[in-house]
Amino acid sequence: MTSPGRCGRCQQQPPAFDYSYCSFLYQSPVSLWIKRCKDQQQVIWLPRLSGLMLTQPPDTVQQADAITFIPSSRRKLFRRGFNITEIMARRLAKQLGIPLIRNALLKAPGHDQRGLSAQQRQKNLRDSLQPGKQNLRGMHILIIEDVITTGATASAAAKALKRQGADIVGIWALARTPPPQWHNTQTPDSSP
């Protein structure tokens, strides 16, 4: 969306998070940088990615009481060696002077979300994201995410934070995967 508000799908089925903000669409060159970071362990891209987020932060960023992130599973941490969202959240929290809360969300063993349909993502997340043991009563928490695809992870994370007492939960993602019809909205110009 080009202006604040809820899209049609979110109006029909509201997510657990109160708002989301995505700095970019998940397309080249941002998508290539994220893939290199995740799949080729090129952490050199992380300062650039979090720096890009700071070029256009959400209007609500200074209202947040704390920042947190989506945790990685042990298997993914072992394989990759780092959690992209944790590193980005640390950098953003430091740059913005907002406290970072670790262990607000806990990750149970589960399958990777990549390649799953929206329905499969919802099912996969039912038990994989659990609330930590934080007292977040009345707090405004901002979750840092690298890519929002269907919003299933963000919604599950928001539910877990609200179970710990969070009053407002926002999502700030580097990129948003555009819907499939996004690429089909342009028709070729047939004029000479």
Image (cartoon, grey):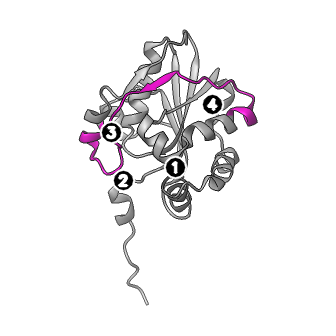
Q: Which residue in the structure is indicated by mark 2?
A: 179
The residue pinned by badge 4 equals 60
| 183 or 141, nearer to the observer | 141
Horizontal and vertical percent position of residue 98 = 70, 26
- Mark found first going from the N terminus, 3 or 4: 3
Asked whether residue 117 appears in the rendered view, the answer is: yes
Identify the image quadrant of residue 82: top right
Q: Do the residues labelled 4 and 1 touch (CB within 8 Å)?
A: no
Distance of label 1 from label 2 (alpha carbons): 13 Å
Is residue 21 positioned above or below 190 on the image? Answer: above
Marks 4/1: CA–CA distance: 17 Å
Majority SS type along the magenta span: loop
Question: Cα distance, mark 3 to mark 4?
Answer: 23 Å
Which stretch is magenta? 93-121
- Give the label, 1 or 2, closer to the camera: 1
x and y, in percent, of residue 97 in the image: 75, 29
Q: Residue at x 38, y 59 (%)?
A: 182
Q: Earlier in the sequence, mark 2 or mark 3?
A: 3
**Under tag 1, what secondary structure?**
strand
State the separation of the CA atoms marked 4 and 2. Answer: 25 Å
Q: Which amino acid does label 2 sit on?
A: Pro
User: Mark 1 is on which residue type?
Assistant: Ala
Q: Please check the rendered image and state whether residue 94 is part of the magenta-colored stretch, yes or no.
A: yes
At label 4, the amino acid type is Thr
Q: Report which residue position mark 3 lands on.
A: 9
Residue type highlighted by circle 3: Arg
Q: Which quarter of the figure is the C terminus placed in?
A: bottom left
Disc ID at residue 175: 1
